[in-house]
Each structure stands twice: as C-alpha cells, then as structure tokens.
Image (cartoon, helix red, strand yellow):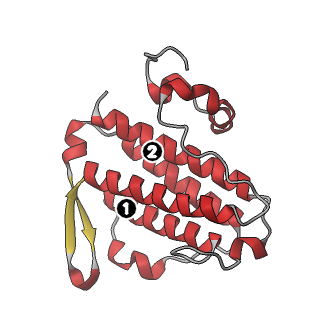
Amino acid sequence: MTLAGQLCIQAHANRLANHRLHAAMAALDAAALHARRTGFFPSLAATLNHVLEVDQYYVGALCGDAGLADHWRRFVPDAALHELAARQKASDERLIAFCAGLDDTGCERMVDMPRDAGRVQHDCAAHVLAHLFMHQTHHRGQVHAMLSGTAVPPPQLDEFLMPSEAHFRVADMAALGWDEARVYGPQQHDGG
C-alpha cells in the first residue's frame, strides 16, 4: 500500500467515525449537548466545534485556501448538532477529495499554514494529514468519554481502518453510498 492510499483510507475512516458519532448523538437534546462536562473543552458541543474549526483550517491549508490567517476569528460555532454535523460532513468530504487526489509527490508537497503574528509554518502534506488525523481521533475520544455521562451509549469508533473488519461497517458504508472495493482496493485478507 502506498502512503497516499493509506491517507485516503484514513480520510474515509474519519468520515465514517464522524457519521457514526453524530448519528448516535442525534438523540441528545440541546441541554445535554451543551451541558458542562469533564474535558479539555467542557461540553460535547464545544468539543465538536473545536474539531470542526481545526479540520476546516488544516483542510483549507492543504487545499491552498486564501485568507486562512483570519480563520480563527471568522469561525462561528454551531449550537445545533444537525448544523454542526452538516458542516463537519462537508469538511470531511473535502478532506476525502483532497486525499483521493494524492500521489507520492503530493504527499511531499509543502503546505503553508499561517500562524500568529504573520508567521507561516511549513510542513509536508503527509505530516499535516498525520497531525490532523491524530487531532480528530484525540478529540473524538473525548466526546466518546463524555457520552458515557449521557443516556446515549458511546458508539464503536475504531473499526474502520482494516479491510478484514468490513462486517462491522456494512450499514455505515451503505448509508454513505460507499463500496468496500472503492475505499480499500482489492481485498487481500481472509474476511475476518
């Protein structure tokens, strides 16, 4: 498997995890979504908005968007889960499209990331993607833990990277209109 292929699978895994997480959380009312909880960001809504804000910044940097220096000031958090989930879906799908177009050269391309005081950070796309996937997983884990204090059982979120675990994601893949062979390529496993 190539690095670009692995990054594309991770982008799909990210979308699948967000899809499953947001679907589970749809049963929460606004009070539960915004209730103060233990975490770096003290509510489910605040944590999910942080994930979205950071995703939009890094995906924008990867895609070469102009105006990223103002991103943090312009970001408006969503109070309603359905609105946040729709924006996250759009960001996730943009990330998938970016990763689907990657090759070895694209993985090594330098990405400019405007920071404070006019400073611009430069890292290769593969490193930016690795950082982004780690950030997403880290904060989704916090949301997962916070859900334990609600009436919603935390959903399983770690079954999406291995082709041999296809049986765990059949419903999610169908809901997203995806095909195992398109996402994972030719299967070379015993089927689980």
* SS state under label 1: helix
Residue under label 1, please give it: 58
Q: Is residue 174 left or right of residue 192?
A: right
Label 2 Cα neighbours within 10 Å, binned few <14 / some 14-19 / many ≥20? many
Whether residue 78 is situated above or below residue 135 in the rendered picture: below
Identify the residue at horizontal 67%, vertical 32% (top origin): 174
Numbered circle sitting on residue 47: none
Sequence-first disc among 2 and 1: 2
| Position of residue 2 measured from the top left corner of the image (x, y, whole percent) | 28, 31
Which residue is more in the foreground, 102 or 190?
Answer: 190
Identify the residue at horizontal 50%, vertical 65% (top origin): 51
> Which residue lies most toward the bottom here?
117
Locate the N terminus and report the quarter of the image it occupies.
Answer: top left
Q: Are marks 2 and 1 in contact (CB under 8 Å)?
A: no
| Position of residue 163 measured from the top left corner of the image (x, y, whole percent) | 49, 26
| Position of residue 151 measured from the top left corner of the image (x, y, whole percent) | 79, 61
Q: In the figure, residue 29 lies in which quadrant?
A: bottom right
**Can residue 67 be spotted in the picture?**
no
Whether residue 80 is situated above or below residue 116 in the rendered picture: above
Q: Is residue 102 left or right of residue 157?
A: left
Locate the C terminus and report the quarter of the image it occupies.
Answer: top right
Identify the residue at horizontal 55%, vertical 63% (top origin): 142
Numbered circle sitting on residue 11: 2
Task: Residue type at mark 2: give it.
Answer: Ala
Mark 2–mark 1 Cα distance, whole angstroms, equals 13 Å
Whether residue 191 is situated above or below residue 144 in the rendered picture: above
Which residue is more in the foreground, 122 or 24?
Answer: 24
